[in-house]
Amino acid sequence: MSNSLYNCCDAQFTFPTDPALRRNLEAAGEPRPPQVSRTSRPLYSSEERRRRDETPWTLVQGILAPVQFVAFAISLVLVLHYLATGEGLWIATCSIVIKTLLLYAIMITGSIWERVVFGRYLFAHAFFWEDVFSMLVLALHTAYLVAIIGGIGSSRQQMVLVLAAYASYAINATQFLLKLRAARLQDQAARSPAHLAVGGAK
């Protein structure tokens, strides 16, 4: 079998990204396969970024988010203390109600913020999965309020429901933190070309 026929057969059964095959194709004058762009869709367009930076609802979200997290941390300690000792039910319940009211506040103001920035109250492309999971968080917190108002289940069972609600909140908060980090990195990347252009013009 000639070398040319061997190379032809080898090329048919060699993975396209094989460096040796690429070198053979280039040596034969064959064009390289086009590279597929893997750039992800930015979280904000330039107009959405402008609206985000200008609306006061961004500051409201920036204040409510850490306040809710502090309420969550305190309430979690009180709930775990009650489950471990059987004491402090009243203060634990109060802390859960406060945490839930803060959740409602951040959900309402967050929907307004999303409407201002993206033109819709929920499920905008940048925060679609975060909003989907937020519905679960909201449902579990609301289920607890229904349980204590309707006297459904024992106090311990209600606290177990709270732990499930708090676990979902922790996951959702992590989602938003990661998205916030991605937004900051994209903002920095968007500003970098402008800075380089200014520096080159000096």
Image (cartoon, rainbow, N blue to C red):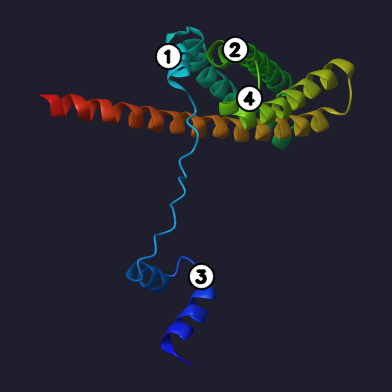
Q: Residue at x 69, y 21 (%)?
A: 96
Tell me the residue that label 3 is attached to.
15
Q: Residue at x 80, y 32 (%)?
A: 156
Local crowd at mark 4 within 10 Å, few (<14), some, or many (≥20)?
A: many
Determine the CA span between mark 4 and mark 2.
31 Å
Q: Amino acid at mark 2?
A: Arg
Tell me the residue that label 1 is attached to.
50
Q: Give the percent coordinates (x, y) of residue 59.
A: 46, 11
Q: Residue at x 48, y 24 (%)?
A: 44
Identify the secondary structure beneath mark 2.
helix
Q: Amino acid at mark 1?
A: Arg
Q: Amino acid at mark 3?
A: Phe
Q: Give the percent coordinates (x, y) of residue 61.
A: 52, 15
Q: Quadrant of residue 18?
A: bottom left
Which callout, 4 or 3, points to the residue nearer the camera? Answer: 3
Tell me the residue that label 2 is attached to.
115
Q: Amino acid at mark 4?
A: Ser
Local crowd at mark 2 within 10 Å, few (<14), some, or many (≥20)?
A: some
Determine the CA span between mark 1 and mark 4.
37 Å
Q: Give the percent coordinates (x, y) of residue 160.
A: 76, 34
Identify the secondary structure beneath mark 3.
loop
Whichever of callouts 1 and 4 sits on the residue coming sooner in the sequence is 1
97 and 47: which is toward the camera = 47
Q: Give the percent coordinates (x, y) of residue 62.
A: 48, 17
140 and 200: which is toward the camera = 200
Q: Are marks 3 and 1 in contact (CB under 8 Å)?
A: no
Q: Are marks 1 and 4 in contact (CB under 8 Å)?
A: no
Identify the secondary structure beneath mark 4.
helix
Q: Quadrant of residue 81?
A: top right
Q: Residue at x 39, y 74 (%)?
A: 20
